[in-house]
Amino acid sequence: MKIINLDKLKKNSTEWIVGELVNKLPEFFSSHSIQDVSKEFNVSPSTMTRVCKKLGFKSFKSIQMYVYEKSRLEIDYYKIADSANIEQIVHNVKGNALFTINETLNNLIIDKIEEIALKIYHSNKMIVFGMEQQETSAKAFVSNLLKIDINATRVNNIHALVQRTMFFNKDDFAVFITRTGWTKEVIEGIKWANNMNVPLLVLTTDEITTKKLIGGDEIDWTDIHIIETQTLKTPNINYPIISSLPGELIIFDVIFNAIISLKPESIDKIKKSNEISLNWNFEGHL
């Protein structure tokens, strides 16, 4: 689990390394003095204080409290045990869902969400590609987009994707959802859309693998956005089917609401459509 987000620190700098050590050693960090932590991390206390402030904390003590409370979540909620006991199974499922939602939201980059929302808002048409379990989140996202008159469609195989995107260009948008990053049809679909110059978003639980399979440093990433859905990775037990869906759905909810903020007139129309549905169901007329 990422205890703190390192986006505010320059990558591979001394400050970045300190931040990574905090994530790797949360118990030590939250239970020792600034002098002891600085010595263990091989930096000066002043550097440690500077890192704390760059991360948005007023003092070393305040970040210690934050790290302590968040690391406790891993023990209290996220700890997974291999057991057939129903009570433990419920705890495991809850832990997976809580981790995925909390960590996925905590690691979202606001500027990236705003850029994606703008591109979808201004696109002529868009397509969402999800297979198997990812069809669930794809269907929910497209259903919401249609409510605010976004020209969106979903497909679940590469043949339909190719047929539809033959008419796509840089003024359109594509979304791909892959749990593992290894799904061949999704990877080839991403390459196809990118070759057609279609801006796109990729949701995956493994950003490194996904980027590598798409093409790594050999391709232009300007119009390819990747958001990683955070999932528990534990040797004890794994819930691959259910663990990524909460993250996908919550990301799509964030993007959808960001799009609505760009066209506030949609809010009244959504309310009106809800009223019509209620009238139909309870009063028998539209």
Image (tube, helix red, strand yellow):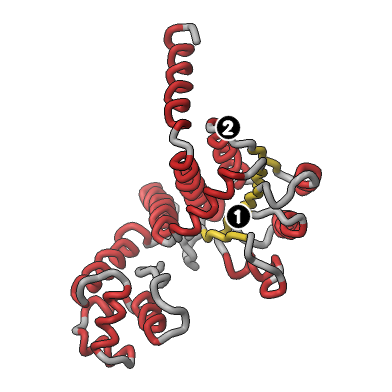
Counting from the top left corner in percent of width and height, residue 182 is at 67, 62
Amino acid type at mark 1:
Leu
> What crowding class fits label 1: few (fewer than 14 Cα within 10 Å), some (14-19), or many (20 or more)?
some
Eyeballing the image, is 47 above or below 208? below
User: Does residue 238 appear to the left or right of 124 in the view shown?
Assistant: left
Amino acid type at mark 2:
Asp
Q: CA distance from mark 2 to mark 1?
A: 20 Å
The mark lying in front, picked from 2 and 1, is 2
**Quadrant including the N terminus:** bottom left
Counting from the top left corner in percent of width and height, residue 187 is at 71, 59
Dot 1: element: strand
- Residue 85 appears anywhere in the view: no
Eyeballing the image, is 265 above or below 180? above
Residue at (58% x, 46% y) in the render: 120
Q: Which residue is mark 2?
A: 149
**Front-lying residue, 1 or 76:** 1
Q: Which residue is mark 1?
A: 201
Counting from the top left corner in percent of width and height, residue 31 is at 21, 78
Dot 2: element: loop
The number of numbered badges drawn on the structure is 2
Counting from the top left corner in percent of width and height, residue 229 is at 51, 57
